[in-house]
Amino acid sequence: MKRAAAVAALDEVPPDVVVGVGTGSTTEHFIDALGSIRDRIRGAVASSLATAEHLRRAGIPVLELNDVGRLPIYVDGADEATRDRRLIKGGGGALTREKILAEASDRFVCILDESKVVDTLGRFPLPVECIPMARELVSAKLQRCGGRPELRSGFTTDNGNVILDVHGLTIDEPDRLEIELNQIPGVVTVGLFCRRPADLLVVGGTGGTDWL
């Protein structure tokens, strides 16, 4: 189902553009598919070092966002999505760079399998990237918001930071919570993609692929 969604998303990629590409298992399928049309695009901007390496293996030139500017399209997966295209992302640890690419894109296409579509966000632990010296401060603030933060053991982001995975949240007002958590000193970004949600969900399912 992940691969079906990834292949279907190729139809959303215009010719002769630079494509923003996210991080994660579903996005890996997209990179493999994108390699089959690499002569039709100018290159890609990667949301992580791992994605950049995969793109190069697929024969796709990797460009820097600062050299490209706006992106016509950004394609990435999600850990959870609602039908109004609010997302939780960051299971792969690249949430900050993913959020930057989403903000820099004219169109954000999210590819996922049907198990990731939910009525209310929060079943998947919410990733929060923070600078290391603020870990305990941020943890205490997250507990006051009703969550149970756990340090992602043995993991450092490409930005040199740590991730707290916050369990136990029922996110009824995701737009408000994204803004609130981003104001905590030491937080780099939170894995809620609501202020800049996806423009399209491409959902692979047992009965085929849906566009939401």
Image: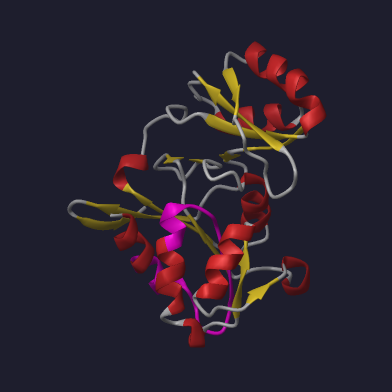
Residue positioned 50% across, 88% down in the render = 39
The vertical placement of 172 against 127, above or below, is: above
The vertical placement of 12 against 112, above or below, is: below
Image coordinates for residue 84, horizontal then vertical, percent: 44, 43
Judge from the rendering whether residue 199 lies leftward or rightward of residue 183; answer left or right. Answer: left
Residue positioned 67% across, 41% down in the render = 156
Image coordinates for residue 146, horizontal then vertical, percent: 58, 13
Q: Quadrant of residue 139?
A: top right
Image coordinates for residue 41, horizontal then vertical, percent: 54, 82
> What's the magenta region?
8-28
Judge from the rendering whether residue 26 lies leftward or rightward of residue 164; answer left or right. Answer: left
**23 or 152: nearer the viewer:** 152
The vertical placement of 201 against 115, above or below, is: below
**190 or 179: nearer the viewer:** 190
Q: Is residue 19 magenta?
A: yes
Q: Is residue 97 magenta?
A: no
